[in-house]
Every structure is written in C-alpha cells, then in structure tokens.
Image: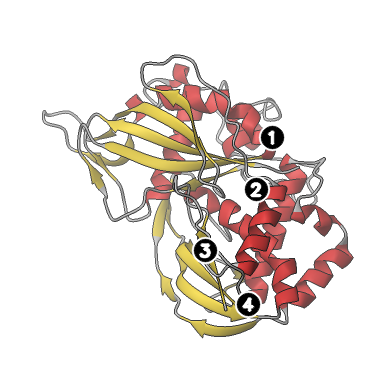
C-alpha cells in the first residue's frame, strides 16, 4: 500500500538566508547538494562518482541514495527511464524571504512509499548540509566571496497530513532519531472522503497540528467542490500549457502521477486508488466520470515564476495556475473521484511537485 510520510523540518539560521519568490526550488537544490555532498565538503555526501555529469552514467545508480531520492531512474519503467521523485517539498508559508541569524526556517518534505527506507540518509544529509548553504549568495562582512546562508538542523517532526497528529523524530540535543510512524494511508483517505462529503468544511493537507476540522451534524449532498491552487500548478495537456482550470486534464494528470508513484514506490500496493489504474478500463471509467464535472466559478489566475536550473545553466519557467476554482457534479461522481483528489493534496499535482508546485486544498459545499 502506498503511504505518505510528511516531515516538518526546522532549520536554525546561522548567517542570513535570502530566498527567491519560489522558495521550493532553493530547498530542492539544498536537498540535492546535501545528499550529493557540499561542493566545499564533498566527503560529507553520499555520491562516490562526482566526476560524472548525471546519475544515469553511474554504475551504482540502482543502489545510490542520491539517485533513489532526487534523480530517480528505472530503465524498465512503463513511462520511460525517468520516474517521479519519491518526495515533494512544501515551502515555508507566508511572504518572508529573508531569515536572520537566530530565526528558524521551517519547511515540509513528504516521502512516498519505499522512500521512507532512505530516511536515515536524509537526516544525515540535513545534519551536514549547513556549510553548503541555502538560498542566494550574499556578500559577507569581510572581503570574501559571496556565500549562501548557513544553518543547522534544529528538529524534524513527522506529521499526518490528514489528522494533524505530530511526532518528534529528531530534536536538538538528542542524538537518537525515531522512525516516522504517522503515515497517510488509503484507509485514512477513504474515511476523510466520506467525512468531507457529509460535512461541508475546508480541508488542506498542510501539516498544521490542528489538522482538519469537521462541523457536527449531517449535511445535504454537496454538489460543488472547490480546488484551491495554493502554489503555481503547471499542467501540460497534449503538449500545451493548461491556462484555464478545465477539470478533465487536471484530473487526468493527477491519475497519471498517482499511478506512476504507486508503480515505482509501492509495487505491491493494495487499496491505493491509483492501483486500480493498472487496468485501463478503470482509468477510462474514471475519466468518463470526470467528463461529467462542470466548471461553476473560476477565480484562478496565471502566475509567472522562474527558477534557475543548475543542470541546464539557465532560467526555466515553473509558473502555473493559482487561486480557487469550483466544480459541480453529482454526489455519486464525487464519491468516486474525491479520494484521488485527496491524494493530490498530499502528492501535489502537475509539474515541479518536488519543488513545491501544485499544492492544493479542497472544500466541499452544499
């Protein structure tokens, strides 16, 4: 069964850290460099073939924690050699871009399925990542070269994104690390779906301790459902950018993502909604149901965002749709589709999910 373990990572800022508008890209770069090894301290990482330009050239790619987390490859994969990364970043909330020494910087990191086995490597990498820095290169007090802000790992908490329950897995001053044990499961997804369809309240998989709130009493059948794109959601449909939030292509890309994650990181999955997609008729049936969903109100807009790609050595567009859109469908349709959409609040939707794009929340209404 596919599971999702969400980690809330807290860093202690030691020298000023300044992030761009798209904070997730910097966090993803920091994570990659931490696993591979900081440029000034490569011995701290896990990459033993740093002279190679890509993980695809390495003979150790099948057993390397760097490749397993941030450069996933599978030559036998149905959808091609490249498979989804088994994690997604949730950038810090709010508008803060600069962090001063003594402040804390907190972000989320969700591990999918078998990626939990790499949790010890992740903790070791984050503990050693501080000298490599984070964010923009800033001038120092002296005459030295500009450097990224440094930090130390302060704490890691496991958080169930559906219930809000939290578990301290690493705390400052305590050498022992506990294995995260608060996964999101398919059973929880199904239970949450039933509650949302009977109680018209907002829900967001955002890792807040208070979790989802449910009003007492039974509500009438909710004919509408609102998706709120909290971070730019970039959907490619038949080679073109989706600039309007049509439901079918959004749902189609979500099904593809869930299927790919399930096949790659939970090959023996049972009960996971995406598992049924291995049978083409099931996917066809779900997409036929999605065709019956109509767009009721659209308050989304397009947000242009750019991110520097160290691999391509250039700025690349990672913008997408943001804001709320409300859809209408029969209750029986939402009963079938809502569990997949709830998984989308955990896995994110669309391109650049690893960088924090495609974060959505869901509300059901009368």
Read off the residue under disc 1. Answer: 114
Classify mark 2: helix, strand or loop. loop
104 horizontally vs 214: left or right: left
Determine contact: label 4, label 3, CB under 8 Å: no
Q: Tell me how far mark 1 sits from mark 3, CA to CA.
A: 35 Å
Q: Earlier in the sequence, mark 2 or mark 4?
A: 2
Q: Quadrant of the N terminus?
A: top right
Q: Nearer the viewer, mark 4 or mark 1?
A: 4
Residue 74 x/y as whole percent: 74, 40
Asked if residue 241 can be seen in this view, the reply is yes
Marks 3 and 2, how far apart at CA: 37 Å
CA gap between label 4 and label 3 equals 13 Å
Residue 84 got which mark?
2
The foreground one among 332 and 300 is 332
> Helix, strand or loop at disc 3?
loop
User: Whole-percent x and y of residue 335?
Assistant: 72, 68
The span from disc 2 to disc 1 (Cα, nearest Å) is: 13 Å
Residue 87 horizontal/vertical position (percent): 58, 43
Q: Of helix, strand and loop, which one carries label 4?
A: loop
Q: Which residue is mark 4?
A: 220
* Label 1 element class: helix
Which of discs 2 and 1 lies nearer the camera? The answer is 1
Residue with the mark numbered 3: 215
Point 69% across, 35% down: residue: 114
């Amino acid at each position: 069964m596919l599971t999702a373990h969400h980690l809330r990572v807290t860093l202690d800022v030691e020298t000023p850290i300044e992030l761009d508008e798209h904070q997730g890209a910097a966090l993803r770069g920091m994570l990659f460099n931490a696993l591979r090894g900081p440029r000034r301290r490569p011995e701290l990482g896990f990459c033993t073939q740093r002279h190679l330009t890509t993980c695809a050239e390495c003979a150790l790619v099948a057993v390397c924690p760097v490749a397993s987390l941030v450069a996933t490859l599978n030559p036998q994969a149905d959808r091609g050699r490249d498979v989804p990364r088994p994690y997604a970043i949730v950038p810090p909330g709010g508008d803060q871009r600069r962090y001063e020494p003594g402040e804390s910087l907190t972000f989320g990191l969700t591990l999918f399925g078998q990626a939990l086995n790499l949790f010890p490597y992740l903790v070791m990498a984050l503990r050693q990542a501080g000298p490599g820095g984070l964010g923009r290169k800033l001038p120092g007090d002296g005459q030295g070269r500009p450097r990224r802000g440094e930090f130390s790992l302060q704490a890691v908490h496991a958080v169930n994104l559906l219930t809000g329950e939290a578990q301290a897995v690493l705390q400052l001053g305590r050498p022992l690390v506990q294995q995260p044990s608060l996964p999101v499961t398919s059973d929880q997804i199904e239970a949450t779906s039933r509650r949302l369809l009977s109680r018209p309240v907002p829900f967001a998989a955002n890792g807040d301790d208070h979790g989802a709130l449910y009003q007492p009493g039974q509500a009438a059948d909710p004919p509408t459902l609102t998706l709120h794109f909290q971070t730019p959601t970039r959907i490619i449909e038949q080679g073109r950018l989706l600039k309007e939030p049509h439901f079918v292509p959004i749902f189609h890309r979500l099904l593809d993502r869930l299927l790919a994650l399930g096949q790659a990181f939970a090959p023996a999955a049972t009960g996971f909604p995406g598992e049924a997609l291995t049978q083409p008729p099931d996917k066809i049936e779900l997409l036929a149901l999605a065709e019956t969903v109509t767009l009721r109100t659209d308050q989304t807009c397009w947000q242009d965002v750019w991110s520097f790609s160290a691999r391509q050595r250039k700025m690349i567009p990672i913008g997408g749709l943001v804001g709320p859109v409300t859809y209408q469908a029969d209750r029986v349709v939402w009963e079938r589709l809502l569990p997949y959409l709830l998984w989308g609040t955990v896995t994110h939707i669309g391109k650049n999910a690893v960088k924090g794009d495609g974060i959505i929340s869901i509300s059901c209404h009368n």
